[in-house]
Image: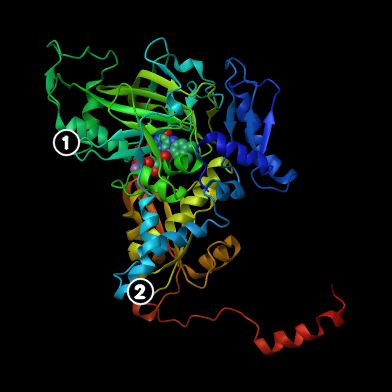
């Protein structure tokens, strides 16, 4: 049963004993972070429940009564509840079922497919005339400062909206994208738009730059007021990084790109904004698939975009093509601050919200935190999709402390010489898996979920100089060690058993395992031994 909206979800968490309401006054500046961090780490031990409960702060300083929800996804159980399953692998099973669909032969097989086809109808979003997110519409006198936006960590450059579903449209195909990109609040009506350059909204932005709108001479009086923060070189780099237009010195692009932001929605929708889906797939469809119920959308007031009808808060606006501004630092999910960089600026044209909105947010920092559980869900759900391209993959583990792009352990069914290296290269070519700094490939008899087994076998099996491969390519914007921002080296470790056809002619020893007969004999006398 899909949750209709954030409230429905909060009520379900409450019923399941997964929510803690807090009525003591708390400060959105740093204090909520400290509390949420203790809950996701310390409370994990105390309650014997990894991740601790979701928290609803009902009395937030300076919030005009707007409550703050945090840690809604912060445990395996809640992640399962959010996606309405008992095991996250159930979703992978449903994806596998869809992918395995073959052409039906005969009437009976066609009939069997009907429920699947009917199910597919639920994936597609529906646009309806109005919804609760329109209860309050403010086209003027609105302020981003009205909401209890957190300052998360001491060295953060300001307050950041951390759980925004950012919706943009591909200017060429008209397809919509929804990605989660944090937003630093600059003032009442502007915020940073931290879409990293390899993300889909950044590509939409570049597409607009490439289309060039018109390039105007800086001295000419453009239709658009010049952005005070205009930095020619930065905008030029943005344009060129897409292989697009090169601005002549003194030239500047003009025009804007519309953006809508939904904050606080049903959990499947929020989650779909973080999944690293192929760029061509609309996240609204993914949310429909996860919810098994269409996402209902309403048209925005001031931009040509649609937003989830039941969202708590909607920000409408645009980014200018000639404006970048310093964003960050921000305490990030690497456990370190991501440093300042130039990003586009979101200008708000309208804010709509429910009558008594609930502000939902998260914090990132040293793992494990709330995003660890979201990442694990992504790992499980994407396995069948990875196997589509790399069917030899048996299982994948992205350890939480590897912060998802630093370390991937993958087991394969090895079938030919050099197979492990083919898999590494395949992963580096697979969407956001391109960011993986270290890929460790093991044989299928290694349980990648058991780090002890992995360490034992990987370090026994490698001849480091022979088995480590380096490559160069794009790295995550958050990587502070790479030689250049966004560009650096990556490492693959081939920890599979080496074959003679790979030049390894020494004998390979067997793993030590007791024989079944002896084990059975000891089983038989185990109690009698009186050891336990
Ligand atoms: C809490 C949270 C915050 C995130 N913040 C950012 C961000 O600021 N910038 C960014 O590019 N990606 C961020 N991400 C990751 C993106 O949401 C993720 O890469 C997503 O797949 C992007 O969608 P897209 O493929 O449609 O661009 C964040 C993820 C989470 C869970
Ligand atoms: Mn996308």
Where does the image place residue 102, in percent across and percent down from the top left? 31, 69
Mark 1 lies on residue: 244
Residue name at image x 33 percent, y 54 percent: 430
SS assignment at label 2: helix
Corner quadrant of residue 512: bottom right
Foreground: 144 or 98?
98
Where does the image place residue 354, in percent across and percent down from the top left? 49, 24
Crowd band around label 1 with a 10 angstrom C-alpha radius: few (<14), some (14–19), many (20+):
some
Mark 2 lies on residue: 108
Corner quadrant of residue 185: top left
Foreground: 465 or 33?
33
> In the figure, 523 relative to 171: above or below?
below
Q: Please tell me whether mark 2 or mark 1 is closer to you in this view.
A: 2
Q: Is residue 358 left or right of residue 263?
A: right
- Residue 386, can we see it? no
Q: Is mark 2 within 8 Å of ligand 2?
A: no
> In the figure, 515 relative to 387: above or below?
below
Residue name at image x 30 percent, y 75 percent: 106
**The C terminus, quarter of image:** bottom right
Crowd band around label 2 with a 10 angstrom C-alpha radius: few (<14), some (14–19), many (20+):
few
Mark closest to the chain's N terminus, 2 or 1: 2
- Residue 214, can we see it? yes
* Cα gap from disc 2 to disc 1, whole angstroms: 52 Å
Where does the image place residue 230, in percent across and percent down from the top left? 26, 18
């Amino acid at each position: 049963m899909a949750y209709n909206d954030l409230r429905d979800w909060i009520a379900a968490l409450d019923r399941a004993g997964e929510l803690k309401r807090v009525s003591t006054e708390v400060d959105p500046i740093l204090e909520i972070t400290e509390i949420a961090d203790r809950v996701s780490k310390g409370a994990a031990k105390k309650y014997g429940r990894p991740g601790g409960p979701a928290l609803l702060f009902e009395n937030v300083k300076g919030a005009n009564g707007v409550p703050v929800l945090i840690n809604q996804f912060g445990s395996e159980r809640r992640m399962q509840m959010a996606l309405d399953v008992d095991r996250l692998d159930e979703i992978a099973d449903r994806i596998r079922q869809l992918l395995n669909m073959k052409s039906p032969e005969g009437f009976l097989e066609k009939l069997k497919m009907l429920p699947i086809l009917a199910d597919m109808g639920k994936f597609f979003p529906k646009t309806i005339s109005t919804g609760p997110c329109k209860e309050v519409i403010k086209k003027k006198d609105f302020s981003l400062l009205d909401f209890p936006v957190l300052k998360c960590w001491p060295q953060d450059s300001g307050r950041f909206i951390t759980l925004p579903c950012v919706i943009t449209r591909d200017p060429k195909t008209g397809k919509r994208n929804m990605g989660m990109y944090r937003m630093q609040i600059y003032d009442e009506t502007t915020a940073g738009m931290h879409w990293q350059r390899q993300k889909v909204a950044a590509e939409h932005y570049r597409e607009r730059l490439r289309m060039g709108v018109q390039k105007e001479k800086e001295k000419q009086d453009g239709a658009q007021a010049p952005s005070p923060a205009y930095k020619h070189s930065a905008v030029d780099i943005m344009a060129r990084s897409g292989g697009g237009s090169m601005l002549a010195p003194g030239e500047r692009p003009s025009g804007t790109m519309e953006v809508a932001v939904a904050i606080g929605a049903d959990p499947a929708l929020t989650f779909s904004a973080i999944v690293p889906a192929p760029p061509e797939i609309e996240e609204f469809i993914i949310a429909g698939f996860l919810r098994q119920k269409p996402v209902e959308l309403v048209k925005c007031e001031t931009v040509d975009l649609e937003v989830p009808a039941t969202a708590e808060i909607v920000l409408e606006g645009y980014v200018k093509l000639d404006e970048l501004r310093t964003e960050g630092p921000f305490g990030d999910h690497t456990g370190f601050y991501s440093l300042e960089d130039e990003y586009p600026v979101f200008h708000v044209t309208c804010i709509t919200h429910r009558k008594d909105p609930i502000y939902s947010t998260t914090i990132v920092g040293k793992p494990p935190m709330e995003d660890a559980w979201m990442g694990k869900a992504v790992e499980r759900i994407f396995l069948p999709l990875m196997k589509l391209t790399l069917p030899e993959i048996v299982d994948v583990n992205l350890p939480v402390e590897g912060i998802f792009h630093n370390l991937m352990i993958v087991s394969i069914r090895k079938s030919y010489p050099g197979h492990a290296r083919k898999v590494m290269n395949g992963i580096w070519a697979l969407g956001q898996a391109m960011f993986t700094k270290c890929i460790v490939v093991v044989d299928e008899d290694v349980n990648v979920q058991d780090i002890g087994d992995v360490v034992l076998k990987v370090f026994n099996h490698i001849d480091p100089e022979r088995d480590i491969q380096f490559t160069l390519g794009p790295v995550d914007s958050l990587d502070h060690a790479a030689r250049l921002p966004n560009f650096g080296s990556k490492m693959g470790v081939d920890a599979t058993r080496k074959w003679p056809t790979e030049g390894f002619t020494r004998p390979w020893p067997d793993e030590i395992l007791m024989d079944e007969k002896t084990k059975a004999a000891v089983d038989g006398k185990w109690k009698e031994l009186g050891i336990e």
